[in-house]
Image (cartoon, rainbow, N blue to C red):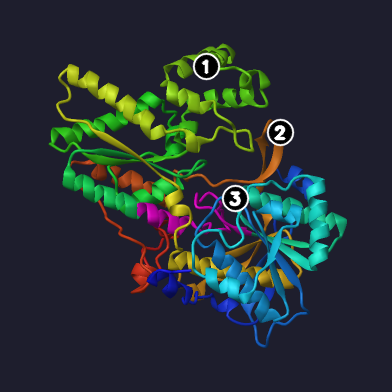
Amino acid sequence: MQKSPLQIARQAYQPKLPVALQGAVRLVEGEKTHSVADQDEIKALFPNTYGLPLITMEPTSGKNASEPFNVGVILSGGQAPGGHNVIAGLYDGLKSLNPENKLYGFLGGPSGLIDGKYQLLTGDIIDEYRNTGGFDIIGSGRTKLEETWQFDNGIEICKQLGIKAVVIIGGDDSNTNACVLAEYYLQKQCGIQVIGCPKTIDGDLKNEMIETSFGFDTACKTYAELIGNIQRDANSAKKYWHFIRLMGRSASHIALECALQSQPNICLISEEVEAKKMTLNDIVEDIVKVIVNRANAGLNFGTILIPEGLIEFIPAMRVLIQELNDMLAANEEFTSLDGDDAKREYVKSKLSPASCELFRSLPKGIAKQLTLDRDPHGNVMVSQIETEKLLIEMVQKRLAVLKANGEYKGKFAALNHFFGYEGRCAMPSNFDADYCYSIGVNATHLIAAGKTGYMSLVRNLTKPTAEWIAGGVPITMMMNMEKRNGKMKPVIQKALVDLDGAPFKYLQDHRAEWADPVTSYIYPGPIQYYGPSEVCDQPTRTLLLERGASSR
């Protein structure tokens, strides 16, 4: 297989490790923990894994050694840069404990564990994937582990392979599944441990212990480069407004981080829209004011960042979507209807008066997208809703009214973009390469110590890598009860953008300056892998601001 010069060079890169993981370690147990909310309900559901202590890894003299054991690894959910390095860290960590240890990769995500589809991961295989993007080493999938027969199948397959522990690399839902699996295996006393690893480019798997999920750094730097390129083009051509939708269904972390890196003219934050109870028209009016102001200065161009999940944070739209979710859940009558018009009329007949009026006001294309198939949780698939096109259409109509009234004399031409898959499998930044490798090595020490129901934890991430702190956090500590498919279920609590936090406050303090006719664009450029640390190893602006650090 042919490789680019950068691919070859990156395979030779040796990720940096915290001092605590560079040799033998000892586990130090801290305080007992409790869930972030709904303590009684979570404790009742997880009697064996609730209340476990926090764990910190500390360097020690001598050498960690163990009897040989085998581990299985699963990549779950959407891709995120650095996943291969978690697996490489797992492999190297296992071999350092005992060269006879084996690592099996379950193919195609959680279904590989259920169906017994796996591959023994050898050194030759691992070496091909070091410091590369993607999840193609074993593939990923979105099968949910929630049925007893699935758990039992997993037990049998692990017994056949002599697997002592399963490592699940995934987001909040995948790690919730990991906790459910750990609890079941303890109840069954089958001797199989489960360890989770925090993955998602969306950045919403974080809390007081998990500072950031892996992949967020690389994805945001990839998107910010593209936004910077577009801004340079806009500032050159001076004739287009670019409406750029960015991944992030449940939270606006990606949009906020990309704004901090590139300083666009407008960045919408879903959580702010919800807090201010803004309507679609309110959002459009805010955009129009900036466009008119810049046009008055002769600048008929700009950039607008739009979080993917924006539409669900508009209060009236959220009510409409919830009504649609409830109405369309397993609704055979709706699916049996022929033609878009028949389906549209059916939907209008079932909605409340306010939601019906809002549904009628939407462009037919957007209204149709709201009624498409639901995701596994019964929710609308917001990635299919082209919010940027909706806003362009509404802004265009409003500007036409202002022009007719003599209040706007500019020219408005818009281009729409959606940046999603471009960032999910990018070659990981040095930060993500190091972070993920550390997460993998750390997981092997949790397994060797017999721990289960934990997430592999690496923090203190704004410091040099050597000063990072490794350990483990009980997954139950991060859980609460939420309504899914009409039922209350235990899930890891998502982290939304904190409107009182330093990253948003920075945006708030500078957005007027960025919207001003004086161009304030930053052009981040491509991810750098070789060179000074301040260029190559910096974490996200979000993390630096949250931790009160300006640079390393």
For the residue labelled by badge 1, is the local secondary structure a helix, a strand or a loop?
helix
Give residue 443's quadrant in the image. Answer: bottom right
Residue at x 48%, y 44% (from the top left corner) = 248
Residue at x 22%, y 31% (from the top left corner) = 412
Looking at the image, residue 193 sits to the left or right of residue 324; the answer is right
Q: Which residue is mark 2?
A: 487
On screen, 293 above or below 111? above
Could you give the CA–CA distance between mark 2 and mark 3, rounded to whole angstroms? 22 Å
Per the rendered image, the range of residues in magenta is 197-224
Q: Which residue is mark 1?
A: 344
x, y (%) of residue 254? Answer: 43, 48
x, y (%) of residue 4? Answer: 40, 69
Taking depth in this image into account, of 139 and 393 the one nearest to the observer is 139
x, y (%) of residue 103? Answer: 69, 70
Q: Which residue is mark 3?
A: 77
For the residue labelled by badge 3, is the local secondary structure a helix, a strand or a loop?
loop
Is most of the magenta stretch helix, strand or loop? Answer: loop
x, y (%) of residue 181? Answer: 75, 53
Looking at the image, residue 206 sits to the left or right of residue 549; the answer is right
Whichever of labels 1 and 2 marks the residue nearer the N terminus, that label is: 1
Q: Is residue 229 magenta?
A: no
Neighbor class of circle 3 (other Cα within 10 Å; few <14, some 14-19, many 20+) is many
Three-letter code, disc 1: Arg
Could you give the CA–CA distance between mark 1 and mark 2, rounded to whole angstroms? 28 Å
Q: Are marks 1 and 3 in contact (CB under 8 Å)?
A: no
Could you give the CA–CA distance between mark 1 and mark 3, rounded to whole angstroms? 32 Å
Looking at the image, residue 268 sits to the left or right of residue 481; the answer is left
